[in-house]
Image: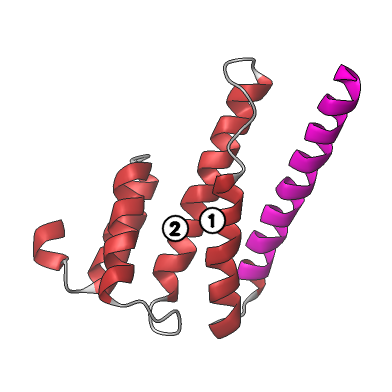
């Protein structure tokens, strides 16, 4: 399906959402990147940016839950940075309440992450 749809960003966006729903995040990111390679303009392809941002946010939250259970270290903040960059592209061309809620959630976790890191540094001093 990916090979047939490689020049059709709309189909690639739907495939990315399906992969995301099925929990295949690497495939979903790759499919979003293919959609963005074929149509980079956020005004015409904002869905790919939204999907990729949601994938990065979900990856961060998954890592955060693992850290809370003691199964891993601090989650990778790069996921939040990438989600923020994608959502800012979407807000420029297609502002909506849902997008603002998503970007607010990203900013919240960026702030919480920074405070937790600061507290961890203070405790070790």
Mark 1: give few (<14), some (14-19) or many (20+) Cα within 10 Å. Answer: some
Percent x, y of residue 40:
36, 77
Which residue sits at x=64%, y=17%?
A: 69
Which dot marks residue 9?
none
- Which quadrant of the view contains residue 76? top right
Say above or below: 37 vs 41. Answer: above
Magenta-drawn stretch, dominant element (helix, strand or loop): helix
Percent x, y of residue 15:
27, 58
- Which quadrant of the view contains residue 125? top right
Q: Which residue is mark 1?
A: 82
Percent x, y of residue 111:
79, 48
Say above or below: 33 vs 79. Answer: below
Q: Are marks 1 and 2 in contact (CB under 8 Å)?
A: yes
Which dot marks residue 52?
2
- Comparing 23 with 71, the one in front is 71
- Label 1 or label 2, whichever lies nearer to me, is 1
Which residue sits at x=26%, y=65%?
A: 12
**Is any part of residue 1 visible from this angle?**
no
- Comparing 22 with 51, the one in front is 51
Percent x, y of residue 56:
51, 49
**Circle 1: element type:** helix
- Tell me where the magenta segment starts and ends, as one range: 99-125
């Amino acid at each position: 399906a990916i090979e047939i749809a490689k020049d059709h960003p709309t189909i690639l966006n739907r495939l990315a959402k399906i992969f995301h729903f099925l929990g295949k995040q690497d495939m979903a990111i790759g499919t979003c990147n293919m959609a963005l390679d074929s149509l980079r303009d956020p005004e015409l392809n904002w869905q790919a940016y939204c999907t990729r941002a949601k994938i990065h946010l979900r990856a961060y939250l998954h890592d955060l839950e693992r850290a809370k259970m003691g199964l891993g270290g601090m989650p990778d903040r790069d996921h939040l940075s990438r989600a923020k960059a994608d959502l800012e592209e979407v807000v420029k061309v297609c502002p909506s309440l849902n997008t603002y809620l998503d970007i607010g959630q990203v900013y919240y976790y960026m702030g919480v992450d920074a405070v937790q890191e600061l507290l961890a540094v203070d405790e070790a001093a």
